[in-house]
Image: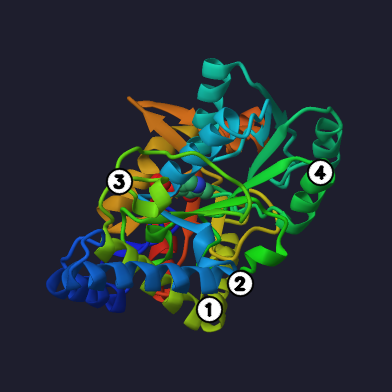
Amino acid sequence: MKKIYLDNAATTQVRQEVINEMIGVLQNDFGNPSSTHSFGRSAKTILETSRKSVAKVMGCNAQEIIFTANATEATNWILKSAVNDLKVERIITSKVEHHATLYTVKNLQKQFGIEVDYVNILPSGTIDITHLVTLLAKSGKNLVTLMHVNNEIGAVLDIEKVGRICHQHDALFHCDTVQSVGKKEFNLHELPIDFAVASAHKFHGPKGAGFAYVKKGIVLQPFLYGGEQEKGLRAGTEAVHQVAGMAKALELSFEHLVEEQQTISDLKNYCEEQLKLNFPEIKVNGSDTFYNILNVLLPFSEEKTAMILFNLDMKGIAVSRGSACQSGSVKPSHVLSEILAEEDLKKPSLRISFSHYNTKEDIDALIDGLKGI
Ligand code: PLP
């Protein structure tokens, strides 16, 4: 059975060149980057070359890139340090953020009594900018944390506009760019962003590697104490092969960006067309969504909700549900809960997310699979 992977917002297939790069490092450069002998120096060179490469693609300085294990870690560190060290008193976020942000913010609220406000979400899945401006009118040390591309529905934030508004109100802006890094041009120095985060496995790199962008001039305190790694901000021996794999993956994403964007956009359009042709009552959740994510409300009965993913999985097709099933009961997604009516929330929604490895045949198989339910 040919397996079909249409869950690229969850994670992506690692590129062969990335695997080769990582194997090369594992085989030939096992030194500890903190060692002063040639083995160590060689590993350190890989690390610093990777940092420069990531920074070049992201349009910032190498010193502004801190390697982490993933984006969750980067977000936890930035938000915690912003409260503890930059004396942020209030965080403005939204209810459709990833749990890496939402639960960190909730925890900071509980632990340090900071104020938290949630900006309204429009039916399109994007934020209500007017409401953000109103929230920012209140004085005090504010930080805004909003995601660039929503991982469930693909709603896109106008980061330029939001960042500008934040800075006009002297608020710091942390942006979860996990779903857009590697899929879009970035020039961080030209964007009004103070902090950004990414995970390599979302752009055909390895799991266990990510990075934080911390704008020059902003001084955060260490996340982990120990050695001098990552300027002492994140102590612990660096995963050199993971970092090298991440840098390679990001380089390749940008080398092929234009052609892959086109392939993926065409696949998404084809999928939407075919779904509408075969299930005329289907509805797309969110509007003007990112080119690799399609979230649809299926015109199937509620009873079929739990069966859909299982049925597709039996056919070797991997997609993601729009609602999280927990111990047999279907709990609606926190993102869809913000944009769908109660009635529609009970119905099954599917997140289909594409990569350049997909083909039209994959989509035909998905449609056939859905028709068989
Ligand atoms: N933010 C967004 C938008 C995501 O999609 C994810 C992963 O699904 C994360 C943060 C967390 O990434 P990781 O699990 O790699 O730390």
Q: Looking at the figure, which quarter contains the N terminus? A: bottom left
Of the pair 61 and 97, the residue shown nearer to us = 61
Front disc: 3 or 1: 3
The residues tagged by marks 1 and 2 sit, at their Cα atoms, a distance apart of 8 Å
Q: Looking at the image, what colour scheme do you see?
A: rainbow
Which of pointers 4 and 3 lies earlier in the amino acid sequence? 4
Q: Is mark 4 on a helix, strand or loop?
A: helix
The residues tagged by marks 4 and 3 sit, at their Cα atoms, a distance apart of 43 Å
Label 4 lies in ligand 1 vicinity (Cβ under 8 Å)? no
Instruction: Tell me if residue 297 comes above or below residue 12 in the rendering.
Output: above
* Labels 3 and 2 touching (C-beta < 8 A): no
Would you name the residue on which mark 1 appears?
257
Would you name the residue on which mark 2 appears?
185
Front disc: 3 or 2: 3
* Labels 4 and 3 touching (C-beta < 8 A): no
Which of pointers 4 and 1 lies earlier in the amino acid sequence? 4
Instruction: Tell me if residue 146 comes above or below residue 83 in the rendering.
Output: below
Of the pair 107 and 86, the residue shown nearer to us = 86
Q: What's the residue type where badge 3 is placed?
A: Gly
Q: What's the residue type where badge 4 is placed?
A: Ile
